Amino acid sequence: MRLVLLGAPGSGKGTQAARLKDHLQVPHISTGDLLRAEVAAGSKLGLEAKEVMARGQLVSDAILLGMLEDRFSRPDTANGFILDGYPRNLAQADALDTLLKRIGQPMEAAVQLEVPTELLVERIAGRAAAEGRADDTPESVRTRLGVYNDQTAPVIEFFRQHGQLTVVDGVGSMDQVFTRIIEAIEPVRE
Ligand code: B4P
């Protein structure tokens, strides 16, 4: 199963991807997690990404593509993957399409988690209190939501035009949302 999860910050992509990984037995590739690992390691790339992420802006497309090419070259993606956090703009959507076709692993399904803005803000505030992630400050969250509306929302249309999009209601408990995703991707798995 080759699946991409789409949705605004706080829509539950990372949360659901972690569960889907166990259910589908494929790796979870989160560009946010890959970047945070670089920041934690203090690598050159991490130093470059750190400030951009804290402000809630997008890290450069070139850095992201390099990181993804690296990740997809590992053998564990041979039987599929769940991609979370990428693509975040149309240039990334095109680059991903080209990369996956080149390695003979075209995307099979795109699931968009739909959640109203008030709930997104509430969830991220909850995570800020619990985990203190550097980019969960109110100012950064405002920027991330703006970036999502301006740059990432058009990506939804990209997958719709490719006939791969399924929209899932992301409101409800984590278990409820998980069940909806499983039902939504069932036709693709058959
Ligand atoms: P990400 O790590 O992708 O962060 P995110 O969009 O906030 O989503 P995340 O998956 O973590 O949160 P979730 O909704 O699961 O990106 C962080 C930054 O990295 C970006 O701003 C950017 O700077 C950089 N970056 C990453 N990818 C990039 C790219 N492709 N190009 C350029 N830059 C890139 O969860 C949020 C909270 O909601 C959690 O606390 C969770 O517990 C809670 N929650 C989830 N589902 C819930 C439910 N059903 N009910 C109640 N709470 C729920």
Image: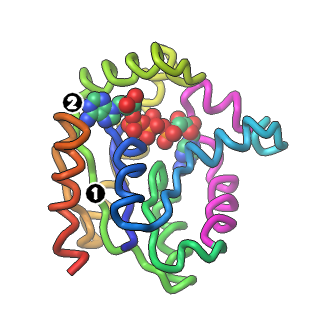
Q: Count of labels shown?
A: 2
**Residue found at x 29% / y 72%:** 162
Q: Quadrant of residue 15?
A: top left
Residue 120 in the figure: left or right of residue 99:
left
State if disc 2 and disc 1 touch (CB < 8 Å): no
Residue 94 in the figure: left or right of residue 6:
right
Residue to which mark 1 is pinned: 111
Q: Any magenta on residue 54?
A: yes
Quadrant of the image for the C terminus? bottom left
Does residue 103 appear in this view?
A: yes
Does residue 148 appear in this view?
A: no
**Residue found at x 56% / y 83%:** 102
Of residue 13 and residue 162, the one placed in the foreground of this image is 13
Residue 187 position (above or below residue 151) = below
Magenta residue span? 48-72
Q: x and y percent of residue 54 in the render?
A: 62, 25
Q: In the current view of this chain or complex, which residue is farthest to the bottom? A: 104
Label number found at residue 176: none
Quadrant of the image for the N terminus? bottom left
Q: Secondary structure at mark 2?
A: loop
Q: Quadrant of residue 65?
A: bottom right
Residue to which mark 2 is pinned: 116
